[in-house]
Image (spheres, grey):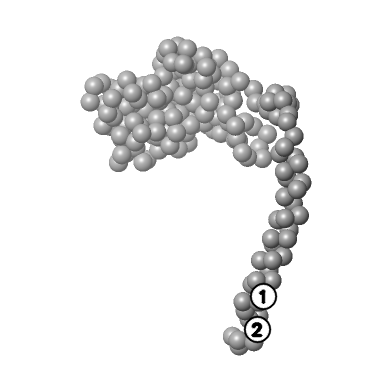
Amino acid sequence: LPSHTFPRLNSYSLHSKSLKMSAVARSVRPFASRVLSQKLPLAAACRVSPAARFPRGSVRSFSQSPFMAVKKYTESHEWIELADDGKTAKVGITEYAAHSLGDVVFVELPEIGLEVNAGEPVGAVESVKSASDVNSPAAGTVTQVNTVLDDKAKFINESPEGEAWIAEISVKDVAELDSLLDAEAYKATVGEE
């Protein structure tokens, strides 16, 4: 490209731009200091409208979907998190279960297409201490498995309620999740605060 197509920056043009920017900053400063110097009661400064609050037990989702991510727990230490589509959900074991099991050495993943009822095994976790079935919290069909766990079973100890989910299922009846525990109720059953 010819050199004449790009404007040449010299020290004068750079200095001129920085002077303009500092003038803008100086003009805003009196306004900002006036606003910040007002003494407002802490309650007024922190007040949130009821419409902005989220229902108890829900998890904040940043999508445009009308569904909010819903995470529920079973008394046998499994969790299920409904996706934004409101139809599929990931299933795994809780942090409490992972801690109780100790170092996980093997994870048995289900077959894709497996149909399960609530309470039926959707996989198994084996640790140096013991082995345990992972039961599905809801009825559905397995649509995906977390193949990372085939090679790195101990990942469950690192992120049991996050990236170390075991299976994704297409939930047959979403209303079935209503009978499960929310985060507060689950923590109460395991004695956590």
Seen from the viewer's position, the closer of residues 131 and 185 is 185
Res. 102 image quadrant: top left
In the rendered structure, find residue 13 and report the number of the disc placed on it: 1
Q: Amino acid at mark 1?
A: Ser
Residue 98, quarter of picture: top left
Instruction: Say few, some or many: other residues with alpha carbon within 10 Å of mark 1 (under 14 / 14 to 19 / 20 or more).
Output: few
Numbered badge on residue 99: none
Return the x and y of residue 115 as percentages of the image width and height: 46, 27
Q: Which corner quadrant holds the N terminus?
A: bottom right
Residue 100 % position (x, y):
32, 20
Is residue 145 left or right of 132 when viewed as pictured? right
- Residue lying at 75% horizontally and 40% vertically, measured from the top left: 35
Which numbered disc, 1 or 2, marks the residue closer to the eye?
Answer: 1
**Please, what is the three-letter code of the amino acid marked with disc 2?**
Thr
At 68% from the left and 34% from the top, the residue drawn is: 66
Look at the picture and state if 87 lies above or below 8: above
Q: Which mark is residue 5?
A: 2
Q: Tell me the CA gap for discs 1 and 2.
A: 17 Å
